[in-house]
């Protein structure tokens, strides 16, 4: 599996040490877009800190560039609303950085099976958002 990590701290790559994959890492989101087109990874880990408030726009750009890629946002104590906006922009999941080391292998396996990586509470929020769109 090919994985692209977009993180300016190096912490995400360190947390993925137990994952067997072809791992590339970039600290700059523009460089990462170029690598994305060449590498065509199955999975992208994006640190929320890299793009900050523009994270949702960046997620949309990644999804537009390579729709088959799954993107997971890694953050630190992000609000439920922030995570929901990322998911609605095209992310397939969210994980707190402090817990990534413990869940990395299971997370990658879940994404490989075509699953999302979100909490049950977030599933309820997504269903509410869909319901609002249907009204």
Image: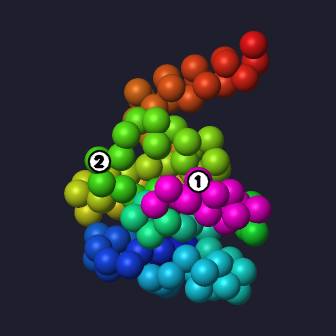
Whether residue 102 can be seen here: no
Looking at the image, residue 108 lies above or below residue 93: below
SS at badge 2: loop
Mark 2 sits on what residue?
77
- Quadrant, the N terminus: bottom right
Residue 97: give x, y in percent of width and height: 29, 59
Looking at the image, residue 131 lies above or below residue 111: above
Range drawn in magenta: 52-64
Mark 1 sits on what residue?
56
**Cα distance between the residues tagged 2 and 1:** 17 Å
Q: Residue at x 75, y 69 (%)?
A: 65
Q: Residues within 10 Å of mark 1 (few under 14, many from 20)?
A: many
Looking at the image, residue 52 lies above or below residue 25: above
Q: Residue at x 32, y 77 (%)?
A: 9
Magenta span: chief secondary structure: helix
Whether residue 26 can be seen here: yes
Q: Earlier in the sequence, mark 2 or mark 1?
A: 1
Residue 82: give x, y in percent of width and height: 46, 43
Pointers 2 and 1 in contact (C-beta within 8 Å): no
Residue 123 included in the magenta stretch of the image:
no
- Quadrant, the C terminus: top right
Q: Residue at x 73, y 67 (%)?
A: 66
Rendered image quadrant of residue 20: bottom left
Q: Is residue 114 left or right of residue 104?
A: right
Rendered image quadrant of residue 63: bottom right
Q: Residue at x 36, y 56 (%)?
A: 75
């Amino acid at each position: 599996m090919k994985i692209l990590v977009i993180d300016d701290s190096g912490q995400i790559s360190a947390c993925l040490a137990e994952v067997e994959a072809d791992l590339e890492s970039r600290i700059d989101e523009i460089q990462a877009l170029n690598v994305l087109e060449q590498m065509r990874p199955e999975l992208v880990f994006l640190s929320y800190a890299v793009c900050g408030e523009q994270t949702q726009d960046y997620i949309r750009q990644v999804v537009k560039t390579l729709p088959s890629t799954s993107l997971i946002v890694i953050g630190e104590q992000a609000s439920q609303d922030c995570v929901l906006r990322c998911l609605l922009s095209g992310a397939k999941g969210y994980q707190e950085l402090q817990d990534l080391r413990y869940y990395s292998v299971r997370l990658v396996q879940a994404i490989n099976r075509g699953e999302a990586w979100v909490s049950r509470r977030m599933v309820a929020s997504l269903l509410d958002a869909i319901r609002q769109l249907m009204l």
